[in-house]
Image (cartoon, rainbow, N blue to C red):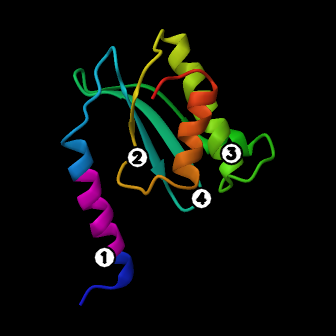
Amino acid sequence: MKCAAQLRKQARDNRRARVRKKIQGSDVLPRLSVYRSGKYTYAQLISDESAKVIASASTRSIVAEGKSPQCTESAKELGKKVAELAKEKQIERVVFDRNGYIYHGRVRAVAEGAREAGLTL
């Protein structure tokens, strides 16, 4: 019998695979992928056509400014930072990939921060 943590991870993997079948990033319209660890949040702009990461950021750099890495404010700042990196590369629109996570909390804050900074999801 599997423990609750294994069942949660398996359910997340199933959601992730189901969503990834439907979305794909390109050089013109990259995929904004969000990963949540226990302590930090990571975001990457990925082009699936060329299989390259265009830009990436994490809340580790925001922690250096004195904020908590687990709070939603840090995740919102992360979204703004990723949007700035995207605009430097002349990217205005992205496809949001929540990576199997529920659209709530830190994942939602990253998306809202990116929208506030002018990125279209």
> Does residue 13 show up magenta in the picture?
yes
Question: What residue is disc 1 on?
Answer: 7
Q: Quadrant of the C terminus?
A: top left
The numbered mark, 4 or 3, whose residue comes first in the sequence reads 4
Judging depth in this view, the residue of 7 and 116 nearest the camera is: 116
Q: Amino acid at mark 4?
A: Lys
Q: Nearer the viewer, residue 85 or 105?
A: 105
Task: Please name the residue that numbered disc 2 is placed on.
Answer: 98
Disc sitting over residue 102 in the figure: none
Question: Residue placed at 37% from the left, 82% from the top?
Answer: 4
**Do tag 4 and tag 3 residues touch (Cβ < 8 Å)?**
no
Q: CA distance from mark 4 to mark 3?
A: 11 Å
Q: Work out whether mark 2 precedes mark 3 in sequence or the reverse, and give the earlier one.
A: 3
Side (left or right) of 84 relative to 5: right
* Residue that carries the numbered disc 3 in the rendered image: 74
Residues in magenta, as a range: 7-17
Q: Residue furthest top?
A: 90
Considering the image in quadrants, where does the N terminus appear?
bottom left
Q: Is residue 26 left or right of residue 35?
A: left
What distance separates the C-alpha of mark 4 from that of mark 2? 17 Å
